Image: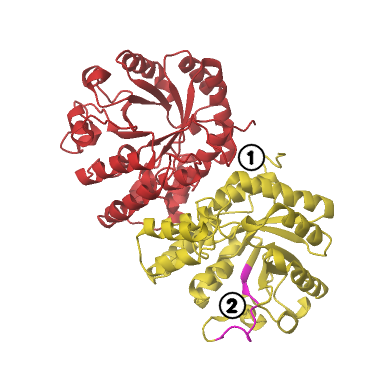
Chain colours: A red, B yellow
């Protein structure tokens, strides 16, 4: 496989996308303090991060607004309260899940919005709906991505078809998403090569969103980067669902572009991350996640196992294994 | 680079070397309960691990025997008390550091010893002394390895010379050791290719010993494995100096040989690892280790930073950076 860039150089196409609030919000139903969100915004600016994803444009018909804090819905005014006119180099992003968003109602013209980019998360069987959303958002003036979740569950020919369809759409960026943290670097590289073939054919950009179930989120991210993937998702201290994501502090430490600087991230960790753990928010690599990752399963059972403070790992593994192989 | 083996097959040359007591002993001065050591021995047998390293043959002239528990010295009788005649498929290993062992006094004939293998740890500038030790141990009947520590600090031409000299020796296995956890997968693969060239020329075997400062111990281990490296060091739950090592439970989960089974390791974690953490033994990935790893430094400053319960990560990074770049 061809390599793009050297360890001592940097590629201007690379964009770091901070998903701390968005993926981290899946851990605590988005109940972050104003201070946390504002400091993260300032941290991202200082550290050279390219995009900050605030959360979701989730449907208020489908989700109880009293059970989730505002970043599940990301009303423009709530974002404005943090960023003002965002007269900075940091672009702002929001995610919308296929089937869980009233996008025609909740996503207006970019000219009136704090957001620069809308990322559409889809499973492989809902790609036509994702493309509809992307066309809508593109017409409203946004940069767009399609994030094909749980790619480790997709078979090769379905994925080939999906990439063809997405390639012919107006989307800007196509994301490889290892939702279950089950990909080994060898597999991540093979998938990246497939996505990059599509990117070359249709003039798209490829992104990578990794999960850390097998302590491979950082490794898979930089391996994909080396292959030519440009948009790199990360979260401060891995804050994200289950085992969490590629840690921003590791990723920025790897990148050679002098615009990136981990100092502000280190400050943020000192001030906010340790406090969040002390509040009882639980995330990050742990044995149960390795087990779901290894079996290529959604982390939900591992999340529950940990929430119940269980440690009977062997019984849990047996349960998962028997259920999947029955 | 050429790939050896496929993700769905297994290679009979692969050997898993459990270093939990030996590298973990660097965290707690080897004060493990008898129960811990015996259960680990039984766990290794059950899970198909190939070698178990008990600890060091350290000089009792140089080290105060009251400050370290017995696995720093690994008297044959202490090992026998755990393993009896070790009438199992698990081989036993012990490490001896160049300059810190009275090997002529403390390592006798293999026929009277519980050990099968002696691993000699050396820096690149003490390789002639390491070879003397290997010749001695080989004559006594042991399998032998030379572990070139801190390879991330060695320059390429010194390393080439070192590998030539070691290649011409009687040693069986040559180890790539990322003592500082500073290698990225790309670098680990490049070094593995270099070691494997030597192995092919001189009919040696190559091993990998990784540290987890940048959450890359598992990734680097399996990437080297894919290149053709055969001896793979791991520790249960990463237990090892500083950020620790490649976790056995991740490594066994990756290997396809049905002789390997993580169930017993999961039991061991439940019974012993959580208890060890509750006793206050501290190891594993944390921000300060990422900083020393990224700067290619010995983890000692990070270990002290954590022992002092400091969290001023940014100041620590500044201190390290300024000291190294002055």
* Residue at (55% x, 30% y) in the render: A228
User: What quarter of the picture does the N terminus of chain B occupy?
Assistant: top right
Q: Is residue A90 above or below residue B315?
A: above
* Residue at (56% x, 85% y) in the render: B64
Residue B222 is left or right of residue A52, and the answer is right
On residue B8, which mark appears? 1
Q: Is residue B61 magenta?
A: yes
Q: Is residue A314 above or below residue A200?
A: below
> Dots 1 and 2: beta carbons under 8 Å?
no
Main secondary-structure element of the magenta-colored stretch? loop
How packed is label 1: few (under 14 Cα within 10 Å), some, or many (20 or more)? few
How packed is label 2: few (under 14 Cα within 10 Å), some, or many (20 or more)? many
Front residue (pair B288, B281): B288
Residue A243 is left or right of residue A321, and the answer is left
Q: Are marks 1 and 2 on the same chain?
A: yes
Q: Which residues are magenta?
A: B53-65
Which residue, as the protein is rendered here, is positioned at the far left?
A66
Residue B45 is left or right of residue B291, and the answer is right
Front residue (pair B197, A126): B197
* Residue at (75% x, 72% y) in the render: B129
Asked if one can make out residue B256 in the rendered structure from this viewpoint, the answer is no
Give the number of the mark in front: 1 or 2. Answer: 2
Residue tagged 2: B72
Query: Picture coordinates of residue B42 (x, y %)?
Result: 58, 67
Query: Picture coordinates of residue A139 (x, y %)?
Result: 32, 12
Alpha carbon separation for disc pair 1 and 2 = 39 Å
Query: Picture coordinates of residue B316 (x, y %)?
Result: 41, 60
Query: Which quadrant holds residue B54?
Result: bottom right
Q: Is residue A249 magenta?
A: no
């Amino acid at each position: 496989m061809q390599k793009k860039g050297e360890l001592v150089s940097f590629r201007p196409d690379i964009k770091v996308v901070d998903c701390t609030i968005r993926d981290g919000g899946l851990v605590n139903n988005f109940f972050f303090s104003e201070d946390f969100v504002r400091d993260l915004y300032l941290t991202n600016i200082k550290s050279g991060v390219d995009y900050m994803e605030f959360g979701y444009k989730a449907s208020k018909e489908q989700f109880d607004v009293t059970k989730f804090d505002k970043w599940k819905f990301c009303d423009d005014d709530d974002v404005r309260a943090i960023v003002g006119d965002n007269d900075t180099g940091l672009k702002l992003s929001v995610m919308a899940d296929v089937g869980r968003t009233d996008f025609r109602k909740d996503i207006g013209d970019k000219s009136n919005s704090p957001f620069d980019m809308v990322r559409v998360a889809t499973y492989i069987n809902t790609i036509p709906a994702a493309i509809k959303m992307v066309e809508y958002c593109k017409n409203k003036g946004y940069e767009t991505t399609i994030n094909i979740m749980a790619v480790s569950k997709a078979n090769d020919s379905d994925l080939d078809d999906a990439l063809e369809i997405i390639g012919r759409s107006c989307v800007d960026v196509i994301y490889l998403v290892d939702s279950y943290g089950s990909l080994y670097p060898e597999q991540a590289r093979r998938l990246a090569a497939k996505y990059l073939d599509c990117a070359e054919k249709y003039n798209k950009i490829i992104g990578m969103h990794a999960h850390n179930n097998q302590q491979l989120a950082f490794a898979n991210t930089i391996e994909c980067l080396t292959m030519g993937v440009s948009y790199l998702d990360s979260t401060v201290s891995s804050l994200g669902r289950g085992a969490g994501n590629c840690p921003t502090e590791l990723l920025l430490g790897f990148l050679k572009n002098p615009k990136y600087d981990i100092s502000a991230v280190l400050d943020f960790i000192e001030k906010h991350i340790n406090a969040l753990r002390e509040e009882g928010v639980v995330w990050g690599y742990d044995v149960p996640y390795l087990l779901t990752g290894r079996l290529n399963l959604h982390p939900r059972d591992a999340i529950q196992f940990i929430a119940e403070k269980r440690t009977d790992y062997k019984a849990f593994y047996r349960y998962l294994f028997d259920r999947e192989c029955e």
